[in-house]
Image (cartoon, helix red, strand yellow):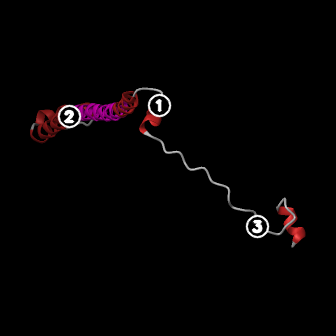
Amino acid sequence: MNKAGNIYWDSASAEWPSATRSVPARRRRTKAAVSAERTGPWWLSFLIVTSIFVMLCVSINYRAFSVAQEEVDKNTRLAVQVQSLTDENLALQEEIHTLKTDPRAIKREAKRIGIALR
Protein backbone atom coordinates (compact mmCIF):
# COMPACT_ATOMS: atom_id res chain seq x y z
CA MET A 1 0.00 0.00 0.00
CA ASN A 2 2.94 2.26 0.53
CA LYS A 3 3.84 2.29 -3.13
CA ALA A 4 0.26 3.04 -4.13
CA GLY A 5 0.12 5.81 -1.54
CA ASN A 6 3.26 7.38 -2.91
CA ILE A 7 1.58 7.83 -6.26
CA TYR A 8 -1.18 9.98 -4.80
CA TRP A 9 0.48 11.73 -1.86
CA ASP A 10 3.70 13.57 -1.44
CA SER A 11 4.52 12.00 1.90
CA ALA A 12 5.69 8.43 2.04
CA SER A 13 3.23 7.56 4.75
CA ALA A 14 -0.03 5.85 3.91
CA GLU A 15 -2.17 8.32 5.77
CA TRP A 16 -4.95 10.31 4.13
CA PRO A 17 -4.18 13.93 3.47
CA SER A 18 -5.48 16.23 6.12
CA ALA A 19 -8.72 18.04 5.42
CA THR A 20 -7.82 21.05 7.47
CA ARG A 21 -7.83 23.38 4.52
CA SER A 22 -10.48 25.99 4.95
CA VAL A 23 -12.83 26.59 2.03
CA PRO A 24 -13.30 30.28 1.46
CA ALA A 25 -16.79 31.36 2.39
CA ARG A 26 -18.95 32.76 -0.35
CA ARG A 27 -19.05 36.46 -0.39
CA ARG A 28 -22.45 37.88 0.29
CA ARG A 29 -23.54 40.51 -2.23
CA THR A 30 -25.05 43.54 -0.64
CA LYS A 31 -27.28 46.11 -2.31
CA ALA A 32 -24.36 48.49 -2.45
CA ALA A 33 -22.22 45.89 -4.21
CA VAL A 34 -24.98 45.07 -6.68
CA SER A 35 -25.71 48.71 -7.45
CA ALA A 36 -22.00 49.39 -7.82
CA GLU A 37 -21.79 46.65 -10.46
CA ARG A 38 -24.55 48.16 -12.58
CA THR A 39 -23.35 50.18 -15.49
CA GLY A 40 -26.49 52.22 -16.13
CA PRO A 41 -29.49 53.59 -14.32
CA TRP A 42 -32.30 51.21 -13.31
CA TRP A 43 -34.86 52.88 -15.57
CA LEU A 44 -32.79 52.10 -18.65
CA SER A 45 -33.43 48.37 -18.35
CA PHE A 46 -37.12 49.09 -17.70
CA LEU A 47 -37.20 51.30 -20.80
CA ILE A 48 -35.59 48.59 -22.93
CA VAL A 49 -38.03 45.90 -21.78
CA THR A 50 -40.99 48.24 -22.25
CA SER A 51 -39.88 49.25 -25.74
CA ILE A 52 -39.48 45.61 -26.77
CA PHE A 53 -42.97 44.88 -25.44
CA VAL A 54 -44.43 47.87 -27.34
CA MET A 55 -42.69 46.86 -30.57
CA LEU A 56 -44.03 43.34 -30.21
CA CYS A 57 -47.57 44.62 -29.66
CA VAL A 58 -47.33 46.99 -32.63
CA SER A 59 -46.05 44.29 -34.97
CA ILE A 60 -48.79 41.85 -33.92
CA ASN A 61 -51.50 44.49 -34.32
CA TYR A 62 -50.12 45.64 -37.69
CA ARG A 63 -50.20 42.05 -38.94
CA ALA A 64 -53.78 41.63 -37.74
CA PHE A 65 -54.77 44.94 -39.35
CA SER A 66 -53.23 44.00 -42.70
CA VAL A 67 -54.97 40.60 -42.69
CA ALA A 68 -58.29 42.27 -41.81
CA GLN A 69 -57.79 44.81 -44.62
CA GLU A 70 -57.16 42.00 -47.12
CA GLU A 71 -60.38 40.30 -45.97
CA VAL A 72 -62.35 43.53 -46.38
CA ASP A 73 -61.00 43.98 -49.93
CA LYS A 74 -61.83 40.36 -50.80
CA ASN A 75 -65.33 40.78 -49.37
CA THR A 76 -65.88 43.91 -51.48
CA ARG A 77 -64.73 42.15 -54.67
CA LEU A 78 -67.00 39.19 -53.95
CA ALA A 79 -69.97 41.48 -53.25
CA VAL A 80 -69.48 43.22 -56.61
CA GLN A 81 -69.19 39.84 -58.35
CA VAL A 82 -72.39 38.59 -56.65
CA GLN A 83 -74.24 41.74 -57.71
CA SER A 84 -73.16 41.39 -61.34
CA LEU A 85 -74.15 37.70 -61.40
CA THR A 86 -77.54 38.55 -59.86
CA ASP A 87 -78.15 41.20 -62.53
CA GLU A 88 -77.15 38.76 -65.27
CA ASN A 89 -79.46 36.11 -63.78
CA LEU A 90 -82.41 38.54 -63.75
CA ALA A 91 -81.77 39.49 -67.38
CA LEU A 92 -81.70 35.82 -68.39
CA GLN A 93 -84.93 35.14 -66.49
CA GLU A 94 -86.63 38.03 -68.33
CA GLU A 95 -85.38 36.71 -71.66
CA ILE A 96 -86.70 33.22 -70.86
CA HIS A 97 -90.08 34.66 -69.92
CA THR A 98 -90.17 36.69 -73.15
CA LEU A 99 -89.24 33.70 -75.28
CA LYS A 100 -91.98 31.61 -73.65
CA THR A 101 -94.75 34.17 -74.07
CA ASP A 102 -94.00 36.49 -77.05
CA PRO A 103 -94.35 34.93 -80.56
CA ARG A 104 -92.42 37.79 -82.21
CA ALA A 105 -89.42 37.11 -79.93
CA ILE A 106 -89.60 33.45 -80.86
CA LYS A 107 -89.56 34.29 -84.61
CA ARG A 108 -86.70 36.78 -84.13
CA GLU A 109 -84.56 34.19 -82.28
CA ALA A 110 -85.39 31.51 -84.84
CA LYS A 111 -84.16 33.81 -87.64
CA ARG A 112 -81.02 34.60 -85.70
CA ILE A 113 -80.24 30.90 -85.25
CA GLY A 114 -81.21 30.07 -88.81
CA ILE A 115 -84.36 28.02 -88.28
CA ALA A 116 -87.27 28.70 -90.66
CA LEU A 117 -90.67 28.92 -88.99
CA ARG A 118 -94.06 28.96 -90.72
Q: Position of residue 25 (x, y in %)?
A: 56, 50
* Residue at mark 1: 36
Q: Earlier in the sequence, mark 1 or mark 3?
A: 3
Q: Position of residue 56 (x, y in %)?
A: 37, 34
* Residue at mark 2: 88
Report whether 75 appears left or right of 99: right
Disc number at residue 16?
3
Q: Secondary structure at mark 1?
A: helix
The answer to whether residue 10 shows anywhere in this view is yes
Mark 1: amino acid: Ala
Q: Are marks 2 and 3 in contact (CB under 8 Å)?
A: no
Q: Quadrant of residue 7?
A: bottom right
The answer to whether residue 118 shows anywhere in this view is no
Q: Position of residue 74 (x, y in %)?
A: 29, 34
Report whether 88 appears left or right of 7: left
Mark 2: amino acid: Glu
Q: Position of residue 62 (x, y in %)?
A: 33, 31
For label 3, count other residues whose C-alpha is less than 10 Å away and answer few (under 14), some (14-19) or many (20+). Answer: few
Q: Is residue 70 magenta?
A: yes
- Number of marks present in the image shown: 3
Judging depth in this view, the residue of 66 and 109 nearest the camera is 66
Q: Residue furthest right?
A: 3
Quarter of the rendering occupied by the C terminus: top left
Q: Secondary structure at mark 3?
A: loop
